[in-house]
Image: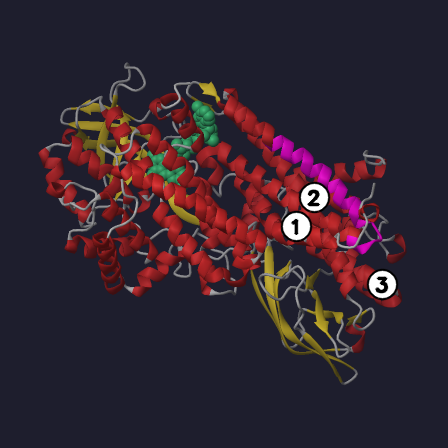
Amino acid sequence: MDFTYSDEQQSLQDSVKRFCEREYSFEKRQALLKTEDGFDRANWATFAELGWLGAAVAEDAGGFGGGPIENAIILEQLARGLSVAPFLSSAVIATQAIAQLASGAQREALLTPLIGGERIAALAHGETAQHAFAPDIETKAAASGGGYRLTGRKTFVLGGQAADLFLVSATTGGGGVSLFAVPAEAKGLERVNYHAVDGRRVSDITLKDVEVPADALIGDEGEAQDAIDYALDYGVIGLCAEAVGAMDAALWITRDYLKTRKQFGVSLNTFQALQHRMADMLVETELARSMLYRGIAALSLDNKRARARGVSAAKAQIGEAGFFVGGQAVQLHGGIGVTEEYIVGHYFKRLALVRGLYGSSDQHLTRFAESAEGQNEEELSPI
Amino acid sequence: MDFVIGADDLAFRRDMRAWIGATLPSEIATRGRRGFHATRSDVESWTRRLNAKGWAAPAWPEAHGGTNWTPLQRYLFQLELRAAAAPVQDQSAMELVGPVIYTFGDEVQKRVHLPRILNADTFWCQGFSEPNAGSDLASLRTRAVLDGDHYVVNGQKTWTSDAQRADMMFALVRTDAEARPQAGISFLLIDMKSPGVRVRPIYSIDEGHSVNEVFFDDVRVPTENIVGEPNKGWSYAKFLLTNERAMSAETAHTRADLLQLKGFAGEKACEPLFCAKLSKLEVDLMALEFAVLRVLHAEGGAQDAVASVLKLRGAELRQRVAELGVEALGNVGLAVNPDPTGHDATDHPAARPPGPDHAVGWLARSMFRRATTIYGGSNEIQRNIIAKAVLSL
Ligand SMILES: Cc1cc2nc3c(=O)[nH]c(=O)nc-3n(C[C@H](O)[C@H](O)[C@H](O)COP(=O)(O)OP(=O)(O)OC[C@H]3O[C@@H](n4cnc5c(N)ncnc54)[C@H](O)[C@@H]3O)c2cc1C
């Protein structure tokens, strides 16, 4: 084991951090959220130039050969900067789904524009409010002409507004789940955009007899479930990394605030009740970071159940820890904490999203417990 | 002792339910059920209906337009109002300044203001907090200097709920700069339309608008607008804050939320982990509700420290029920879902997401309720009060 970043990882972290410090200001972000797109496409081009969009893609697929650690490094910093760019949805989840499923020419055709920043993709998988994480897929793909005809409805598609390409899961005649690359402008595809609690854009999409050619099918027919699960697990760990970044930022902003804010003639940091609260927040943040590493380790396990168990453990634990730390950061700020004008409430919103997105804590605890059934302890753990 | 509700009270409750059901317009109830900040016109029209029956302020003494209901009846009425999603009345007026005026005000103040409050002719806001005087209210600096038969007010208030729609503010102002912090403060009634008053909205993390900053620039307030004696404002404020805390358990509200939540949770309510949280919340609410009833039945009403118990736990339950509502909604609960009537929103409301009508308002509720443990004296301050006043620590 080795808990230090390699030189490359350290410099990746430095570069994302510097970028965020230079390019992201709270005021700019608040203005950006009011624009049609909701994020800055010029920055997206820079992400591509700097190699971040392919950071976790194998070199032979045109990426930079990193993995979940690189993604976590990027997402932790982007979350500190309260970025609303569709990085998690396109550069992580969609990219991993394609990398898992596609091979050869199709992989090249789909991944290259994503890594290069020319295209943005989003996984359109969830169908109902409750089971966005592991839904029963009702969207159907029927053979039609030489290709397929898709019909169905997808909800809460993260990053959907900016997407040029949707990766749509659907059942095919054989019964299994398949994944299709559907251009956003395809005839019969309707998209409704809205905002997630943290300001990021999400979409619901309806597919009404959308015709796609045969090569829109990514990988083999009926064989997509494992790849989707893997991509979502990857995304969940990405969310956990976002949470750790947001928690850490909220923690230290609050520490600094307590040292400057005076009530009763003294600065707030002199009240022991608040010192202890901050100590609890630090405990949660440290354990969340540790759990993030544990989750990253689980993501690399070949045993699918061990992976599911580790990822779900991380999500359940970090989701709650983040909500606690974010909530307390708001509380310790007093009135200013609940305003749109001040940054700390926005970290709380990010943490509220993380807790609920891609499976609630309950759903992950349930998956955690179920994935252990019939497995022996050694198979389940990276150590 | 007898802890069980009697037949008379049950009948009272049924009557109230029937009357509210027949009287509350459904579009007002729909807006109420969504939980956004109520519109002035909803509050106005509903308060006037109540006032016509003499029920606008049941807790007030009969002599000033209240009822002679028992504490239990008043509580039952609250339960029915909240269950029906009636708009919350102007609390600053009914529950805060009204009692101060009938307890400490002069005859003219009583005659002028109380009937207008009961009929929702004047809306009020509470001007206590300032940028540097939050938990430590006594350090407030807004000053009022005597100039003939007027006070000239200069300074700034903040977090003023509903200042944007209020006609009057009751403010704490410093009238003696030399005195110790708690002394030298007066309780002043300020007409919000006076020249020199400026209101700036502050949007909150629910993406709604209820709080404001209020600036005073040489605002002239007639001396007859001082309540009680000059420089004694702190004691009136303490009286009022105890009132505020006693009511702030908001159990009737939490009960209504829970009912709504159980209504749409469906199968989710049976999932073991969710069910455990829901049940725990219900059980905690039961305990708090009986604590409220105990206080309501106690001679002389709530003492400081007991009021703090109610405020502290009540605020937490308000938060927990809203968070559980969001959780029950799944992803739909994670979407910003602005007020469909467009009333309660920032200057740049988010797009409306698809989703069932019952989802509207829950996320906003859960965001805004981060403030329940902050306003009206934060939970930390309530714990300080309990530690000092009850535990003598
Ligand atoms: C939504 C909303 C509506 C409001 N409406 C009104 C209104 O209508 N009128 C009005 O006058 N005011 C209103 N307020 C103001 C409210 O009363 C104050 O926000 C509150 O008193 C806290 O003050 P503060 O915000 O300055 O926080 P601070 O006093 O700066 O407190 C910051 C943190 O420090 C903690 N703290 C402070 N002192 C101590 C201590 N001695 N020991 C331990 N911890 C401590 C607090 O609990 C809090 O966590 C409203 C506030 C909100 C958020």
Ligand 1's quadrant is top left
Query: What is the span of residues highlighted in magenta in the rendered image?
Result: A281-305
Q: Does the Cβ of the disc 1 residue fall within 8 Å of ligand 1?
A: no
Asked if residue A290 is among those painted magenta in the image, a careful observer would answer yes
Residue tagged by mark 1? A365
Is residue B223 something that shows in the picture? yes
| In contact (CB < 8 Å): disc 1 and disc 3 | no
Q: Nearer the viewer, residue A112 or B364?
A: B364
Q: Residue furthest front?
A: B1
Q: Amino acid at mark 3?
A: Glu
Residue tagged by mark 3? A108
Q: Nearer the viewer, residue B110 or B223?
A: B110
Horizontal and vertical percent for residue A367?
A: 69, 54
Q: Are marks 1 and 3 on the same chain?
A: yes
Residue tagged by mark 2? A241
The local secondary structure at tag 3 comes to helix
Asked if residue B240 is among those painted magenta in the image, a careful observer would answer no
Horizontal and vertical percent for residue A350?
A: 59, 46
Left or right: A159, with A372 as reference point: left
